[in-house]
Image: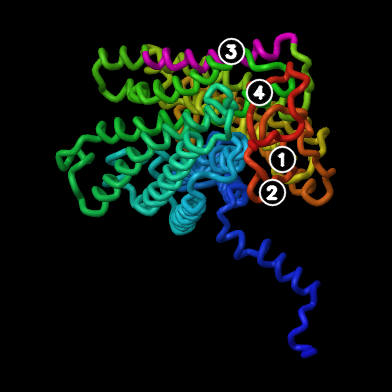
């Protein structure tokens, strides 16, 4: 036998593994689960970059005098914190990570409808991230995350065009993700998975995808106009050239208020999965919770001008938008009441995901109630552009969206990684995040009511005590965020191997191995039970298949 033709089976196996698990296989993968993990790594990076800017902001505000950074540097810090956190973490985090991983699993599909477009959406995210980081490292941006004109088009001498291009590109990443989800949910549900058997997380992702598709193009067009006006000195928004700066505000907030629900709807879907699981009950008012997601998506497009009550708009238009802003709170309240009713007399297990769900419900409710103050014309005039608005926004976005994201990561981490995290550390982290968050942002409600304006580099000495509390809270909050990252990484090597369904949860994703195989299901599953059927002791432990 010619020795040159002998193939060492060990070498052959190593070559196969290198092909399967090498860098090239990850960069060219079309597996929705791997793409979700690529998003997880990149989104986590931007979360800590944005968090670093936030920490520098709080350190600057530790004392009344501007003695850590210069005023123009401070403007860049809060601008880049907002732009990175909103567009590179809050908007894509749950859809791109948990949505990508779970949508096909939860509806019984083998992958998303357009796997290659799914990979393209991640590459667009990376391209946008590189553009944004280049803008950050070569001078930064100082316009505020809202790009308000005419400052962004005529006066700022920072990297406005580059940051605008970055957000333009990342917007298309979101559009492609939304398109993929809508087509997948419509066309690739398993037999028996009717609309009224869909998990509520799927309903929330569907509503979020509608906002992606209808709202994000408006932001892309708006930023394109800003770039063109800045580059070619056109008169679109600049009043000195015949433009209208209020037109920019209308266009920007037409996207950016629905974007609030892009950030919060997925977290609501996560809470709707966690609460039934750890109370061992079918969710109260399933159809109302599902329709509330659609209602939020629709009404979210009708309330944008409550950001403009002091911008000179008609008092009659302001009254209409004030009323609509109160109305959009109704479907959110339906969800909160139904989660509470589900917990009532349930067999509750206080595991880490449920603690994050409790944190979400409390903090989101606080944020929603303070939003009613901002929808009231008289109060809004007093607190506009103060720290009251900052506190309200963060109670919704950080207290709501991030608590939901962390709850979902803890809930599905055994499925994603195949490993269990240390439960005691998980509970401790949830407690630290809750305490740190409230210590950071509750004092800002008081600061805002007393009149401290946001975006200011210095402040009167009488506000220092509350600012010290807020800065102390931010350091505690940072510890709470770092802790899960540490024990998640630890669990991947040392954690206990996870069973397919460690929580005893209902849903197709829990009827696959942990982590799931490449194509999720060996055969197409057949759904014969209702969603969240925790009262049915005959709920199948293995996936029935269509023959």
Which element type, helix, strand or loop, lies under badge 2? Answer: loop
Q: Which residue is mark 2?
A: 517
Name the residue tied to disc 3: 285
Asked which quadrant contains residue 441, the reply is top right
Q: Quadrant of residue 107?
A: top right
Q: CA distance from mark 2 to mark 4?
A: 24 Å
Q: Secondary structure at mark 3?
A: loop
Nearest to viewer (mark 1 / mark 4): 4
Residue depicted at x 63% and y 32%: 526
Give me the C-alpha separation between circle 3 and circle 2.
34 Å
Q: Nearer the viewer, mark 2 or mark 4?
A: 4
**Residue 33 visible somewhere in the drawing:** yes
Q: In the rendered structure, which disc, 1 or 4, sits on the residue that comes first in sequence?
A: 1
Q: Which residue is mark 1?
A: 512
Residue occupied by mark 4: 529
Tell me if mark 3 has few (under 14), some (14-19) or many (20+) residues whose alpha carbon lies within 10 angstroms of its own: some
Give the Cα distance between marks 3 and 4. 17 Å
Q: Residue furthest left?
A: 242
């Amino acid at each position: 036998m010619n020795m040159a033709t002998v193939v060492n089976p060990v070498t052959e196996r190593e070559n196969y593994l290198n092909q399967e698990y090498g860098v090239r296989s990850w960069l060219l993968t079309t597996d929705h689960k791997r793409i979700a993990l690529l998003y997880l790594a990149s989104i986590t990076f931007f979360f800590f970059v944005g968090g670093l800017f936030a920490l520098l902001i709080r350190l600057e505000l530790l004392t009344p005098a501007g003695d850590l950074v210069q005023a123009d540097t401070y403007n860049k810090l809060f601008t880049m914190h907002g732009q990175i956190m909103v567009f590179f973490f809050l908007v894509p985090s749950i859809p791109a990570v948990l949505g990508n991983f779970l949508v096909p699993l939860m509806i019984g599909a083998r992958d998303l409808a357009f796997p290659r477009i799914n990979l393209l959406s991640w590459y667009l995210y990376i391209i946008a991230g590189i553009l944004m980081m280049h803008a950050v490292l070569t001078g930064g941006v100082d316009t505020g995350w809202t790009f308000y004109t005419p400052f962004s088009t005529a006066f700022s001498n920072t990297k406005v065009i580059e940051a605008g291009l970055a957000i333009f590109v990342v917007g298309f990443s979101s559009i492609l993700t939304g398109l993929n989800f809508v087509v997948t949910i419509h066309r690739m549900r398993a037999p028996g998975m009717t609309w009224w058997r869909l998990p509520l997380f799927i309903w929330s992702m569907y509503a979020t995808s509608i906002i992606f598709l209808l709202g994000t193009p408006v932001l892309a067009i708006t930023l394109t106009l800003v770039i063109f006006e800045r580059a070619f000195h056109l008169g679109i928004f600049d009043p000195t050239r015949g433009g209208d700066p209020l037109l920019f505000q209308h266009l920007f907030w037409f996207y950016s208020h629905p974007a609030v629900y892009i950030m919060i709807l997925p977290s609501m879907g996560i809470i709707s999965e966690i609460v039934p699981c750890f109370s061992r009950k079918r969710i109260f008012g399933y159809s109302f919770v599902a329709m509330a997601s659609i209602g939020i998506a629709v009404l979210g497009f009708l309330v944008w001008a409550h950001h403009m009550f002091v911008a000179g708009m008609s008092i009659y238009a302001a009254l209409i938008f004030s009323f609509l802003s109160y109305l959009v709170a109704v479907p959110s309240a339906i969800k909160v009441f139904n989660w509470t009713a589900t917990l009532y007399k349930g067999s509750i297990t206080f595991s880490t995901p449920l603690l994050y769900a409790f944190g979400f419900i409390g903090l989101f409710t606080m944020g929603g109630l303070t939003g009613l103050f901002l929808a009231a014309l008289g109060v809004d005039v007093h607190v506009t552009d103060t720290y009251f608005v900052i506190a309200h926004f963060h109670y919704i976005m950080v207290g709501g969206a991030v608590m939901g994201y962390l709850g979902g990561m803890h809930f599905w981490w055994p499925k994603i990684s195949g490993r269990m995290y240390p439960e005691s550390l998980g509970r401790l982290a949830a407690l630290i995040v809750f305490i740190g968050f409230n210590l950071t942002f509750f004092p800002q409600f008081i600061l805002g009511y007393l009149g401290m304006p946001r975006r200011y580099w210095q402040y009167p000495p009488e506000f220092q005590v509350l600012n010290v509390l807020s800065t102390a809270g931010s350091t505690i909050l940072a510890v709470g965020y770092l802790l899960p990252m540490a024990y998640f990484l630890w669990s991947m090597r040392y954690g206990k191997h996870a069973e397919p369904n460690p929580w005893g949860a209902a849903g197709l994703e829990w009827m696959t191995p942990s982590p799931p195989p490449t194509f999720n299901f060996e055969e197409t599953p057949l759904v014969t039970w209702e969603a969240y059927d925790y009262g049915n002791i005959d709920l199948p432990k293995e996936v029935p298949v269509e023959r």
